[in-house]
Image (cartoon, rainbow, N blue to C red):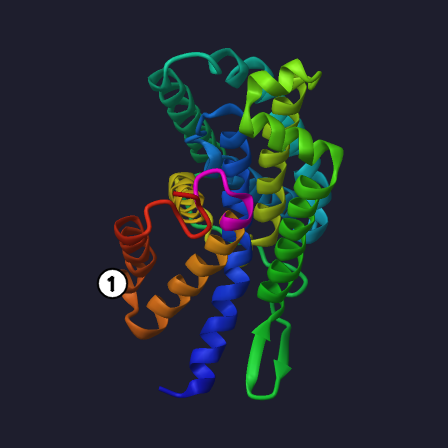
Amino acid sequence: MDITIIAQALIQGLMLGAIYGLIGLGITMVYAITGLLNFAHGDFMAIAMYLCLALFTHFNMDPYLSSLIAVPALFVLGLMVYHFLFRRVLKAELLMVVQLTLGMVFIIESSLLLTFTADYESVPNILHAVRFSLGPLSVSGSYLATFLVGGGAGAALYWVLQKTDLGRQIRAISQNKDAATLMGINTTRIQMIVFALAIALLGLSGSLTTSILTMEPYMGLELTLFAFIVFVMGGVGNFLGTLVAGYLLGIADAMGSLFIGGHLGAMVPYGLFVLLLLFRPQGILGAK
């Protein structure tokens, strides 16, 4: 196979991997400070994508411009979901958390189905038909924007976690919640902010991928599954590992589509996940 085609697929995988990493980082952050998993994680990204569709349909608003509405809206939605629902099960049995978040999945997906029907949708953006060339390689403007904005957001968030007071508080809670509380950290407030921030990241991811991913009301579970895979592959609770795993999964997805194609090609990321569990169960950057 032509090396140019392989390089083209590799670049496309890296660009999509930036979004995978960003989606997985949200689950990692929430788990690190609460110890709980949100099975409705991907459905919030679906909400953001359908919000962009509604704004495009009624106001002809470009999805990139819609992100200025989607990100704050998802942040506020995250605050409300945490305050009224998630906060109440922080000390409950794991099964209750699973039931709550799966119930949210059914509510969100049914609402999207009633509002937008089951038709497959996509929303073109201003860069959808633009291509950038670098020698024999050609990159779609949508993929390039996704890589630059998604990768930049992931890097900025990692910097916040490592270099700011908020980041130090988040890491302190993730290491020992009780000790962080005794040191004067308002753990309840930090948990609410982090949960809302994780949902807001999905608002950004959804706005960037409306022309890349095909929308349908039940897409949330698949996105959640990818987020869980990235979460585990990077090393449970490891922020940098999550970002690295996102890029690796994007490359595996692109290579599977190129060399195998069809449903068998779509199995490659899952096969990579299984191999990692067998030979390095602690994850790429996880500790033993």
**Residue, x 41% and y 29% (percent of image)?**
105
Residue 239 on the magenta span = yes
Q: Quadrant of residue 236?
A: top left
Query: Which residue in the protein does label 1 denote?
Result: 264
Q: Position of residue 221 (x, y in %)?
A: 38, 39
Q: Is residue 123 visible?
A: yes
Relative placement, left or right, of 214 versus 183 is left
Looking at the picture, tell me which residue is in the foreground, 34 or 99.
34
Residue 141 on the magenta span = no
Q: Quadrant of residue 101?
A: top left
Q: Position of residue 176 (x, y in %)?
A: 55, 23
Region in magenta: 235-241
| The C terminus sits in image quarter | top left
Looking at the picture, tell me which residue is in the foreground, 29 or 217.
29
Q: Position of residue 56 (x, y in %)?
A: 64, 48
Mark 1, Cα crowd under 10 Å, few <14 / some 14-19 / many 20+, is few
Q: Quadrant of residue 259?
A: bottom left
- Quick check: 71 above or below 266? above
Relative placement, left or right, of 277 versus 287 is left
Q: Position of residue 260 (x, y in %)?
A: 28, 71
